[in-house]
Amino acid sequence: MPEAFSPAPCETGIFRQGQTGFVALTKGEKGYGYTFSDGTVGNTQDAGALLACGKDAVLVNGKERWPKVALAEADTRFESHGVMLAGRLMEAPGAGKDTPLVVYAHGSESSGWIDRARDPYQMVGRGVSVFVYDKRGTGLSEGEYTQNFPRLADDLVAASREAKRLAQGRYGRFGLMGVSQGGWIAPLAQARAKAQFLGIGYGLAVDIAEQDAAQVARELQDKGYGGDVVAKARIGTDITARIVKSGYQDGLDDLSAFQRQFGKEPWFALIKGGYTGVLLGMQAEELRKHGIPQFDKLGVDWSQDSVQALRQVAVPQLWALAEDDRQAPPAVTVERLTALRGQGQAISVYLFPQADHGMRSYVQAPDGTRKPTVITPGFYDLMADWAKGGADGAYGQAYRK
């Protein structure tokens, strides 16, 4: 081991040797996760981990010392709807009036993003300044965790104001980026945040009920079932959509009939979706009396129309989608984005083949289960280039639609 490297506890940040690549360290469930700029991921506690932590540096492949990059970071707290949220501005080295600044909208996870999310560090390492915050009810932020998109969009607007205040005089283009659920939230916030562009990763231009139905269809197709079974399951997802959208007032008798008719068929127990699998496993009377408390407390606004929200966006949008996404199947989203583009909106769509949700490449076993591997090559380069003013050239195996 080189004498210049001294083992020490891990700390979040970016580590770089030369100008060709870098690695970001973030806190994980255990140990620290690492993400190389080429998409290679791992954890410091894994057997065969590719790096070891040291004082102001990491040791890569047991031989190369990569020093820590000095980032300008500013922690802050800001208010939205009476709730104090925790945020952090992370500025690219040498940030100035031409440096793009983005604020990230979370996915649906219930964990905070400060010190934990890999995407902000991958942007900063590529010369983009980032404001990241823990959404309400997660991490260092106060409040109750929610999946109420209008409320979360209000929080994103408040975060945008705080980001601009902290970075005043040291940024140029300002935009919003959203991943997964953030693809629903960022368009709702764009105009009020005065964002000049949107960048969406593995998001959807369908509503929550449509996502659930697409998820269920994909689950059954992946298990080898054909159109006849998928059509039966679609009857079920139509019923469960009516139930959730009506607050358990409509569709409960139909649910009971569906359970009696198909409950013993082998495909029935395989259904999960976003919520349909839970509803199919419950009795109508229980739903009528008590609902589903763990879902109801999320405050979902079932009236949200994602296409209507996108029609209000008057700035360029980038959508980077995972072609094999099981959680957010992209087919209908691509159709709708293409239609909106045909109506005059500035929308760029890139599809990454052999990528699942989270833009993870994978290895698939004979039984259909997938083991995630790297972040699919080109994804972070595409998002960073978009923030800088435009995507141009090749991004891994991605193709434009």
Image (tube, rainbow, N blue to C red):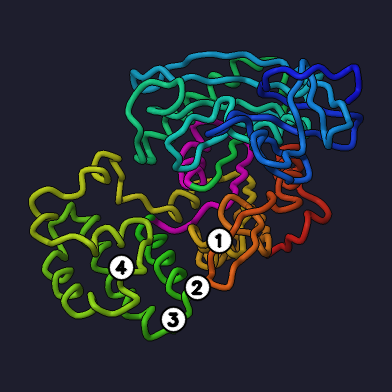
Q: Amino acid at mark 1?
A: Asp
Find disc 3 in the rendering and name its residue: 225
Q: Secondary structure at mark 4?
A: helix
Gap in angstroms between the C-alphas marked 1 and 4: 19 Å
Q: Nearer the viewer, mark 4 or mark 3?
A: 3
Callout in the foreground (1, 2): 2
Three-letter amino acid code at disc 4?
Thr
Task: Residue 314: name its quadrant.
Answer: top right
Asked whether residue 119 is drawn in magenta, I would say no
Query: Residues under labels 4 and 3: Cα distance?
Result: 16 Å
Q: Secondary structure at mark 1?
A: loop
Provide the residue designation for mark 2. 222
Callout 2, which amino acid?
A: Asp
**Image height of 329 relative to 163, above or below:** below
The residue tagged 4 is 237
Marks 1/3: CA distance?
A: 18 Å
